[in-house]
Image (tube, grey):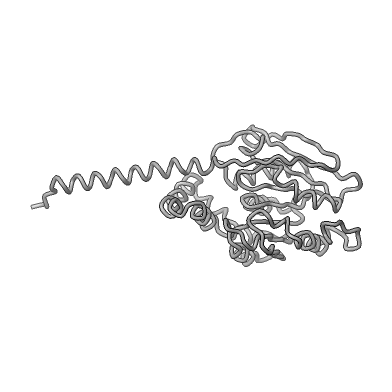
Amino acid sequence: MPPVVSGVDMVVMVGFLVCVAVYLLLTLILTYFVQQYPRNPVADPPDWGQVEDLRLKAVDGGSIEVWRVRPEGPSRGTILFMHGWGRNRDRMVGRARIFASWGFTTVMHSARDHGNSSPSRFMNIMKFAEDIETVLAWLDEPVVLYGHSAGSGGALIAAARNPGKIRLLFLEGVFADTYEALMHLYTWASPFFGRSCGPMILFWMNLFYGGRLKKMTPCRLAADIRVPVMLIHGEKDGRFPLRFAYELKACFNAAPVTLYAASGANHSSSSATPGYGPAVRQFLEDHGALSADSTRSNHAN
């Protein structure tokens, strides 16, 4: 005879199935929200050079806000900046100001669903890359590409897909594995949330994006990069620890890679450290983007 399921066992089984269903639904809802929030734009417009403020048509029919700031004299080339998650183009102005002091044209844009660019649901580093590619197509010239945090992931994707359009690549606040980085970020924000919901949120993300979350992970993409790369990372970065930068550095097989570990810096303050300007300038000089005998600004001294 088949075993008889008691009323108590049935209640326990139903209760368990209800809990599983609630957990799956909760994590599915959270998967939506973690891709929509938070949004922390700042206000810091450029205060140098000839500023163009314009909008470009995005791949989904929306629009992207863009600043192009030309120097008063001849330009040494164009630097394209991509901000991190939840920020906007203003967040990159401080970094752009340093490059502008060396005579570069600087371009900053807000990803969709950030700043005053058009809304877009389920933002991710793949969409960041699409927005970078929109700006690259508009510029129609080889550029130095600079990404921060999530923007570094988008920059790496764009660089791998558009090798002829990238002269040099700067990646700040980086990570080697998307799964590991997001799990660390969720746990850093809330240990309980990260450990209990993080794995399922990442499962939903990868399912929703047809496996591209793993395919587009930075360590895999690094093997396709041929241009010189500079990694910049805060020594005290709590969101993405410094070991992430060393892990990514080891993934580049064909590109010369320089790592600047900013002493005492957190996730976003590497560019404010005394060594940032000299290290970045040396990298530019080493790879022919800036002549060593040109006048050095106060940022580099």
Q: Is residue 220 visible?
A: no
Q: Could you tell me residue 105's position as x and y percent? A: 82, 47
Q: Could you tell me residue 50's position as x and y percent? A: 85, 39
Q: Is residue 74 visible?
A: yes
Residue at the farthest left position: 1
For this view, does 21 lie left or right of residue 121?
A: left
For this view, does 7 lie left or right of residue 272?
A: left
> Can you say which quadrant of the picture contains the C terminus?
bottom right
Q: Residue 119: name its quadrant.
A: top right
How many numbered discs sit on the rendered protein?
0
Q: Residue 279: name its quadrant.
A: bottom right
Q: Could you tell me residue 120's position as x and y percent? A: 58, 36
Residue at the farthest front position: 264
For this view, does 287 lie left or right of residue 203?
A: right
Q: Give the vertical position of 278 relative to 95 (above or below).
A: below
Q: Could you tell me residue 53's position as x and y percent? A: 77, 35
Residues 148 and 57: in front is 148
